[in-house]
Image: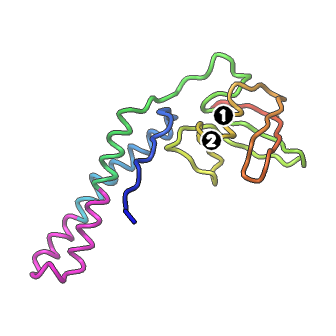
Amino acid sequence: MSRYRPPRTAGTALITPQGEARLRAELHELWHVRRPQVTQSVSEAAAQGDRSENAEYTYGKKMLREIDSRVRFLTKRLESLKVVDSRPADPNKVYFGAWVTLENDNGEETRYRIVGPDELDLKQGLISIDSPLARALVGKALDAEVRVQAPGGEQTFYITAIEYP
């Protein structure tokens, strides 16, 4: 069995200003803080002698490769992203960046913000513009009925509030 994995699709190249700031902060942290620390520990481990049996050296080199890989990804991704910082022409409809409050058939409410795929965080209520729910919501107005095909079957939601930060 091969270890080849096809490259992950990058998704929609949209991001909110907060998401861009978070990615830039991660890039800065990796390049200016973590990488110098790991480089220093690798050089100290290399100075101890035999590298073939030195776990600190091997682990440090692996960490450097992971950091460099993430730095390359973030650098390329930040170049290709378009920051969406303006409000839509029609704020009464759901578009990128909107906070949407949904009510299901049981009367339970949930609140989501439609963001780029790089900002996805369900614990904070951030859903990707590429997700089935977000695709179903985009362009809909207040009080609209939205049907989404979920793994557990089709679900129906009603839009009860739309807000833009």
Is the image coloured rainbow, by chain, by secondary structure, or in one colour? rainbow
- Which residue is denoted by mark 2 in the rendering? 131
For the residue pair 66 and 23, the one nearer the viewer reads as 66
Distance between mark 1 and mark 2 Cα atoms: 6 Å
Q: Where does the image place residue 97, in percent across and percent down from the top left? A: 60, 32
Q: In which quarter of the image is residue 56?
A: bottom left
Q: Does the magenta run of residues contain 78?
A: no
Q: Where does the image place residue 147, in percent across and percent down from the top left? A: 79, 37
- Which residue is denoted by mark 1 in the rendering? 135
Q: In which quarter of the image is residue 127?
A: top right
Mark 1 Cα-neighbour bin, 10 Å: few <14, some 14–19, many ≥20: some
| Disc 1, SS | helix
Q: In this view, does 63 lie to the left or right of 11?
A: left
Amino acid carrying mark 2 in the image: Ser
Mark 2 Cα-neighbour bin, 10 Å: few <14, some 14–19, many ≥20: some
For the residue pair 124 and 127, the one nearer the viewer reads as 127
Amino acid carrying mark 1 in the image: Arg
The majority secondary structure of the magenta stretch comes to: helix
Q: Where does the image place residue 36, in percent across and percent down from the top left? A: 22, 60
CB under 8 Å between callouts 1 and 2?
yes
Q: Residue at position x 63%, y 50% from top?
A: 124
Q: Residue at position x 62%, y 20% from top?
A: 88
| Disc 2, SS | loop
Q: Give the range drawn in magenta.
A: 39-67
Q: Is residue 63 left or right of residue 132?
A: left
Q: In which quarter of the image is residue 78?
A: top left
Q: Quadrant of the N terminus?
A: bottom left
Q: Does the magenta run of residues contain 54?
A: yes
Q: Which residue ends up furthest to the top in the rendered image?
A: 89
Q: Residue at position x 81%, y 44% from top?
A: 155
Residue 59 numbered mark, or none: none
